[in-house]
Every structure is written in C-alpha cells, then in structure tokens.
Image (spheres, grey):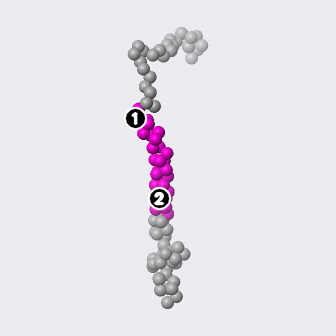
Amino acid sequence: MHAADSARRPRAPCFIDPPGYVRHRPETTQLYRLVEQYYSAFREVRAVAETAALLADEVLTRASAAPVGATTPEAFAAGRPGTAAAIRGV
C-alpha cells in the first residue's frame, strides 16, 4: 500500500456518546457487591477442593501400585505385603 492510498482512505470519526447514552455502572449492581463480598471465601474453598483432589489422586495412584496382599497400612506404605499378625510379631 502506498502512502498516497492511505492518505485518501476515510477514517472513522472519534466515538461520540449518542444522545441518551448513560455509562453502565456495574459496581452499583447486587451481583457485583455479592462477588466482591464472597470472592475471597470462594477462592479459599476452591483451593481446598483442589488440594483434596490432588490428595485423592495420590491415594489412588499409591493404591494401584500397592502389591497384592498389602493388608496393613504399614505394609502398604512400605510397598510390601504383610498382615496384622506379622506386624505384631505373632
């Protein structure tokens, strides 16, 4: 495009508020006030839910990797089979 072409192109006029136009003020709405009031609590709940989901995924991952016969929490954590009697030394 040549400089002469761009000089002849019509330009849009600057925006002028049409008659009767009134700016919308969202800060005065009930929704805006409710979001402002409860957003921090919502974020905290979401963070807890995300942490719980990550923990659940970790438990499921470990459970699927546990050896067959790991019947006690200690044996499960150690990754070896065991029974309550074996841990008690019976």
State which mark lies toward you, 2 or 1: 1
Q: Residues within 10 Å of mark 1 (few under 14, many from 20)?
A: few
Residue shown at 46% from the left, 62% from the top: 56
Residue type at mark 2: give it: Ala
Point out residue 16 in the picture as x, y percentages from the top left corner. 47, 15
Residue 43 seen in the figure: yes
Is 77 situated left or right of 24 in this image?
A: right
- Above or below 84: residue 23: above
Q: Tell me the residue that label 2 is attached to.
A: 52
Out of 58 and 5, give the one closest to the viewer: 58
Q: Give the range drawn in magenta.
A: 29-58
Give the number of the disc on residue 63. none
Residue 79 seen in the figure: no
- Quarter of the image with the N terminus is top right
Out of 33 and 84, give the one closest to the viewer: 33
* C-alpha distance separating marks 2 and 1: 32 Å
Numbered-mark total: 2
Out of 6 and 80, give the one closest to the viewer: 80
Q: Is residue 45 magenta?
A: yes
Point out residue 77 in the picture as x, y percentages from the top left corner. 52, 73
Circle 1 SS class: helix
Residue shown at 46% from the left, 65% from the top: 60
Point out residue 9 in the picture as x, y percentages from the top left corner. 52, 12
Give the number of the disc on residue 30. 1
Residue shown at 56% from the left, 11% from the top: 7
Circle 2 SS class: helix
Q: Which of marks 2 and 1 is nearer the N terminus?
A: 1
Residue shown at 47% from the left, 43% from the top: 39
Q: Does the magenta stretch include residue 47?
A: yes
Q: Main secondary structure of the magenta part?
A: helix
